[in-house]
Image (spheres, helix red, strand yellow):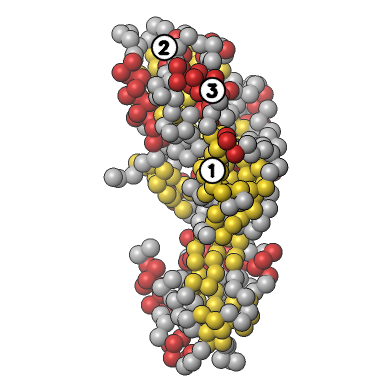
Amino acid sequence: MDLISGPLDDRHLALGATMGPFGGWSMPISYPGGTVAEHTAVRAAVGVFDVSHLGKLQVSGPGAAEFVNSCLTADLARIGPGQAQYTLCCTESGGVVDDLIAYLDGPDSVLLVPNAANSAEVLALLRAAAPAGITITDRHRDLAVLAVQGPRSAELFATMFAGFGGIADLDYMAFTEAGSVRVCRTGYTGEHGYELLVPWEQAAGIWDGLLAGAASLGGVPCGLGARDTLRTEMGYPLHGQDLSPDITPVQAGSSWAVGWSKPAFWGRAALLAEKEAGPTRRLRGLRATGRGVPRAGMTVLRDGEAVGVTTSGTFSPSLKTGVALALIDTDAQVRVDDVLSVDVRGRGLEVVVAKPPFVPSHVR
Amino acid sequence: MTEQTPEDLRYTEAHEWVRTLESGRVRVGITDHAQSQLGDVVFVELPDVGAEFAAGDALGEVESTKSVSDIYAPVGGTVVEVNTALEGTPELINSSAYGEGWLLELEPTEDGAAAVAALLDAAGYRELTAGA
């Protein structure tokens, strides 16, 4: 399958990026400075990410918001127009088809941003369920998505969008329009930050402006490698690893993104039953105390007995140690601060059970 | 970011470099190409001094934020020295793959000179990585 190129391909190549396949798209994994330097720039200053591979599905028509609310897990009635929400698209058995951001324009318009790899499936499910009058438009290649993350991102925005007063001061998960660019106070790094939805043909100009502004603040362009180490340090799940059709939000600790009192959403009966009975496994954080890096798919042991499996794992540039998320059997009654072991290619890596985030969150 | 492949070294298909020292020992590291593919190196696992390896044996690991790679013995021999600086500063492999980021030194078992001569020269290694 040919990879899809985003609107900033030439920019990434000129910067010397290492490109890699991501959900069918060719995206920057890192720039020559390397993942650790990019990660550190986001924690200390500001980083600019191209995440244009993310899906964009426009749901329109009378009662569009109500329709979305009857499908996806989070309660869209809890936010108002101009606000965004993290939500889940579940199967009837409670597994997760995708996690996504819903931008609420108003009762008749919602923009959904799913993961690249799952966009087509979410689109198909919504179209199949949509009543007459509701249309779902795939805008995957109409809009670029840029993320600007880090403690100095507000400074960057105050300058860059000076003509649009107050953008830098948006509330968490609120969005507004700056001309044809939509700016939302959200992100996937644990830092104060913004994500921008930019018309495809304007993406290069906005990218150039953001990079120039970021450079003067000690910021750098960042690839998906840093996005992964940053999100893992926060314990944010990644669909396909920590959330999947086989891993429910109750197991993954994402129950907060489920509107339990809603009368209807996909997977409601199964999820309510699982919540009632208690999940048989639960996503936990693990912090390595020994040398080594846990990776996804490794067995977690206690006293030599398997108690779970890692779903994500990486080296934490902030902590300078390995960190992981792992599905741990409830029966094992594992608690925070318990010492476990991860089978890293036949060697036992000692880890401590920790409650994520592994480093403090600064999103608000 | 042109990758460096010094002319005075020998190379393996597993992306190690080998430098024959005046003592007859060989110093081993990973190539600039290898470190560039790996990305930021965060841990290096090296064998103990005195350990013996046949050519092609896995003798350690280099782990980056992205992935982990085995290091193979380019020639047979006994480990006579390891670069202990890598324990605290594994990033030396990224900043100086052919210098301060060296991994270890081997005392070749027998006919080390011939074994080293049989490895790829710089032109051969460049050819190997040209398509990568």
Could you give the CA–CA distance between mark 3 and mark 1, rounded to whole angstroms? 19 Å
The residue where tag 1 is placed is: A308
Label 2 is found on which chain of the structure? A
- Res A230 → quadrant: top right
**In the rendering, at what x and y percent does residue B94 appear?**
58, 64
Q: Do the residues at pointers 2 and 1 share their chain?
A: yes
**In the rendering, at what x and y percent does residue A89 appear?**
44, 24
Task: Determine the secondary structure under disc 1.
Answer: strand
Label 3 is found on which chain of the structure? A
> Looking at the image, can residue A192 be seen?
yes
Say whether marks 3 and 1 touch (CB < 8 Å).
Answer: no
- Dot 2 amino acid type: Phe
2 or 1: mark nearer the eye:
1
The residue where tag 3 is placed is: A277
Say whether marks 2 and 1 touch (CB < 8 Å).
Answer: no
Task: Determine the secondary structure under disc 2.
Answer: helix
User: Mark 1 packing: few (<14 Cα in 10 Å), some, or many (20+)?
Assistant: many
- How many dots with numbers? 3
The residue where tag 2 is placed is: A67
> Looking at the image, can residue A314 be seen?
no
**In the rendering, at what x and y percent does residue A118 appear?**
39, 32
Foreground residue, B41 or B52?
Answer: B52
Vertical arrangement, residue A221 with respect to residue A171, above or below: below
